Amino acid sequence: MQIENFRAMNSQMVLVAEGEASQVRFGLAAAQEFMEAGEKRFTRFSEYSELARLNRSAGSWFAASADLFDVVREAQAHFHRTHGLFDPSILPDLQNAGYVHSMDEIRRIGSAPRPARPFQKFASGFESVELNENTRSIRLPEGLQIDLGGIAKGWIAERAARLLSRYTSSCAVNAGGDMFLIGRPPGKDCWEVGLEDPRDPQTDISVLLLQEGAVATSSVVKRAWKQGQLSRHHLIDPRTGEPANTLWLSVTVLAAHAVTAESFAKAFLIADENEARQLGRQNPELTVLAVDKAGNLISLVQARESSYVHD
């Protein structure tokens, strides 16, 4: 297996591939280039990104690239599938919580700015975003601002893996916890993926035995910072506009596609017990694992054909 590591999207990227050496090297380079280009397109930390230009166009139709249109369409579908628990329109609330710089920059500075405004729910939310398939155009309601960070990262990871697979017999892409796996490692019938203990990143709480598909983990401890005396994290509850008060330290979702795994990992992490049960009943094809505050690993949803955990 050849392995490539690099930094992008404020996360560590890991590409793993098996195959003929020269072809694998070409595929790894192509996948890395694709991921770095995707970061430039979808980041909210550059005024020159396509996402930033979309946000500035709120109230008017915006002619989007095929990639941006696809990610916003996926975001809209998963907003509805999660009953609004996954909601990209929380960008102003993220900024109000101090997430105004990249996570790498916040870690360097050691703190985040104080809140600039109280929570304000716009009359028109993400459900009012309009898409025109014929012209590939998007119209955000006036005043609405969106953050595609997590779902874009999952989308990029899967697309990069599929690109890499053209040059390899098997491969995996890990984009800071959003993974997509294709084929099988040589000599094995599954991928073995360590499930990180959210209390101790150097320790695995379990090992996932995975077939081809996606796995994503959301955590309230990975992207966390101080805002004055307040402890903050990036998982915003769209109902309150504040970092979510969760039952779990982390939630991991196994799914057929990375955007699904990513959006449902956030939704299950934010959900209360009743909401989690409802999401589980409506999406039995998922496997959902949660780590509680005592470090216990709990299965919230078990897909019938899923084999996954060894302690």
Image (cartoon, rainbow, N blue to C red):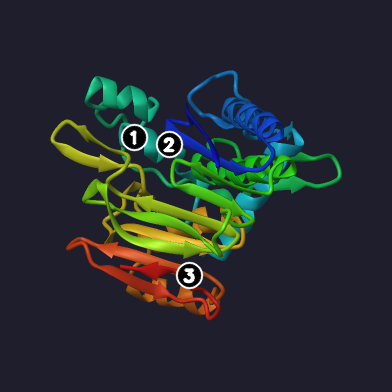
Label 1 near label 3: C-beta < 8 Å? Answer: no
Q: Between marks 3 and 1, how big is the CA–CA gap? A: 33 Å
Residue 188: % across, % down: 54, 61
Q: Between marks 1 and 2, how big is the CA–CA gap? A: 6 Å
Is residue 85 something that shows in the picture?
A: no
Corner quadrant of residue 64: top right
Neighbor class of circle 3 (other Cα within 10 Å; few <14, some 14-19, many 20+) is: many
Label 2 near label 1: C-beta < 8 Å? Answer: yes
**Residue that badge 1 annotates:** 96
Residue 78: % across, % down: 58, 58
Left or right placement of residue 267 versus residue 234 in this view: right
For the residue labelled by badge 3, is the local secondary structure a helix, a strand or a loop? strand
Residue in view at x 31 percent, y 29 percent: 116
**Residue that badge 2 annotates:** 92
Residue in view at x 56 percent, y 49 percent: 126
Q: Which tag, 2 or 3, sits closer to the chain's start?
A: 2
Residue in view at x 70 percent, y 33 percent: 60
- Amino acid at the residue labelled 3: Thr
